[in-house]
Image (cartoon, rainbow, N blue to C red):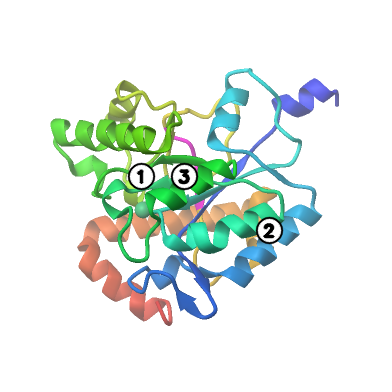
Amino acid sequence: MTKEDRIMTTRVVALTFHDVEHNGKAAEPASDAFYRIRAAELEQLLSLLRQRGYQTVSSKTFRAWQQGRGALPQRSVLLTFDDGYASHGEVAASLLVRYRFTGTFFVTIERVGRPGYLTWEQLRKLVFLGMEVGSHGLTHRPLTSLPREELERELVESKRMLETQLGVPVQALAAPGGFWDARVAQAAQRAGYDAVWASTIGTNGRETSSQGLRRIVVRQPFSAERTLALVEGWRPGLWWATNQQTLIRVLKRALGVYWYEQLKRRVVPDA
Ligand SMILES: [Zn+2]
């Protein structure tokens, strides 16, 4: 296999994290325990990735590679953090720096500066540390359910606010709640986004649509080894994760968020 072949066949897994619990206490008490992991668990995963020779790439670096600009490390992983929790600035960022990794942080404008969430100052620090910041909407409402003008406002205004406050171009969007469709993708393109990250399980290659990039959501029960196996493209693991994520989406749609939450609490202890 030539070097060129290896680059052509590169597959990249993107992981999605939410709140990170530190010293037994979640930074945001109302954050969903189902999607929350402990700082020690995050560190265990980062350490495993480092041992296996993984390097992180940002959404921007990945897109550049997709467009034929620049190469990717042979073992690349994309770490994304959703919702702009304060723990991302207080816990996750310093762990990333310690392991010489970077992350892509998707922020919901309405939550910036609220208790438990990142402030603009903390967001500027993330940018200073070499992290990428992307939009996660203005209000975190599911974009698929919004009328055209509101959808556009969510996409255009959140991008504009982030760019004004942080002084850097914002090119990536993560669809809140993973609610994404072709209409959202087209609106995102019109709003000037270069990458739209969904919650469709899978790996990303050159051919993957930049308007529907795939991510695997990290959730409880957490296992660093199992998560590493997903990053390494362990197929039965991807199959199971895909079906779990699809099931969650179907249940959320069928039951509505309230009943879905009730069911989840019965199935997942301590959620
Ligand atoms: Zn979210």
Which of discs 3 and 1 lies nearer the camera? The answer is 3
Q: Residue at x 66, y 65 (%)?
A: 43
- Amino acid tagged 3: Arg
Instruction: Give the magenta range.
Output: 212-216
The location of residue 163, given as percent across then percent down, is 38, 32
Q: Would you say the beta carbon of the disc 2 residue lies within 8 angstroms of ligand 1? A: no
Q: Which quarter of the rendering shows the N terminus? A: top right
Whether 111 is drawn above or below 41: the answer is above
Q: Would you say the beta carbon of the disc 1 residue lies within 8 angstroms of ligand 1? A: yes
| 72 in the magenta segment | no
The disc placed on residue 46 is 2
Of residues 39 and 250, the one nearer the viewer is 39
The mark that comes first in sequence, 3 or 2, is 2
**Is residue 259 visible from the viewing direction of this image?**
yes
The location of residue 120, given as percent across then percent down, is 38, 48
- Amino acid tagged 1: His
Q: Which quarter of the rendering shows the C terminus? A: bottom left
- Amino acid tagged 2: Leu
Of residues 15 and 172, the one nearer the viewer is 172
Q: Secondary structure at mark 3?
A: helix
Residue topped by disc 1: 136
